[in-house]
Image (cartoon, grey):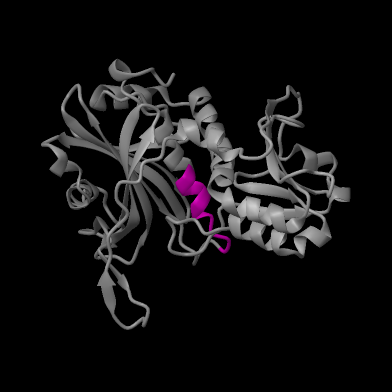
Amino acid sequence: MKNGVIIIFATVVTLMLGGCKAFNTISTSNNSQGAPYELILVCAQPEWQSELGDTLQAVLKQPVKELMQYEPSFDVMRILPNNFKSLTERHRNIVVVNVNPSIAEPGITVSYDKTAKPQIYITLKGPDTKSLAKYVSDNRENIMYVLEKAERDRTVSYARQYYSKPLHEKILSMFGMDLAVPNNYQLRSESDDMIWISQEFPTASQGFFIYKYPYKGKESLSAEALVKARNKFASRIPGPNEGSFMTTTNKIVDDTGLDYMPYMPEYRQLLIGDRMWIEMSGLWEVENYFMGGPFVSYTTVNTQTNEVVTIDCYVYFPTLYNKDPEKRNKLRALQHLVYLANFPAQGTSAE
């Protein structure tokens, strides 16, 4: 279990530019192309076959930590510089590699909406492949941060434009929380202290439930207390069979494949804006039925009502029916919602 990790988003980008410092936003009328978490990497063959190419793949295609099965952080499509034109120049996520002996030292330039909108356009440059590979490795967390933030900002922008007013009003009334939920989500159930919202597909489900309970001090925010609370409320989400319901996975198969070992969700503190949240990521399953998937929950304290409030996001996307699983995209879209959440009397409205 990871404890006490605090990420302050406002400062990370500033820290990443140890070399070339350049952030630009250029006005353009072209609409960007490409799917979420898809990325165009413009890299010549010599650089691609060097340690720089290996480093770029290791960074951009690192596994999504919340998922048990491997999915890369980004779907990387590498193209040669001569092929970087027309539609590829208007992609939503672009990373260009520039290796030239005339460049004094390795660095990075991050531009927004350079050839299309919305778009992030990153140029990595250095005098040789070895020094640039080291630069990319040393700055991997910050490079991934700006790419992830660009995807998150798109989700947030869409939700603010196309949100469900009934769901917005219901969440505000029940939890005192301003949350713009995209209008393709539907209300599944509600009670005095919980609301369940989801998108349902023929062979998949993407949803979240929000719940609240009295805050009784720091012990209310321990990992054990959060799992206990999650199981209490998740049990209200029914499974396919009578008597089946959602719960939190507490054991997984060990390395031998013959036995089980204890399993506990990951736990960390997260500062988003001026509000502290606890992020907990793990696995859920259905009691009395073979069904499960990943979840990520976000918990904070509403000091106006002295209540713990949790946004619990889950995905069901079985590989059996989906040959190219994209749990990553569905889970990330849910995770981005927390960046829309605030408590109006304590901060600025999300609208």
> Which of the 4 image quadrants contains residue 304?
top left
In the image, the segment drawn in magenta is 323-332
Against 94, is 116 above or below?
above
- Main secondary structure type of the part rendered in magenta: helix
The N terminus, quarter of image: bottom left
Residue 323, image x, y percentages: 57, 64
Residue toward you, 9 or 127: 127
Residue 93 in view in this figure:
no
Residue toward you, 56 or 133: 133
Q: Is residue 328 magenta?
A: yes
Residue toward you, 116 or 235: 116
The C terminus, quarter of image: top left
Residue 83, image x, y percentages: 86, 49
Residue toward you, 45 or 213: 45
Q: Residue at x 24, y 49 (%)?
A: 234
Against 157, is 201 above or below?
below
Q: Is residue 69 magenta?
A: no
Residue 297, image x, y percentages: 33, 45
> Which of the 4 image quadrants contains residue 35?
top right
Against 66, is 257 above or below?
below
Q: Residue furthest left?
A: 216
Residue 80 in view in this figure:
yes
Residue 185, image x, y percentages: 43, 36
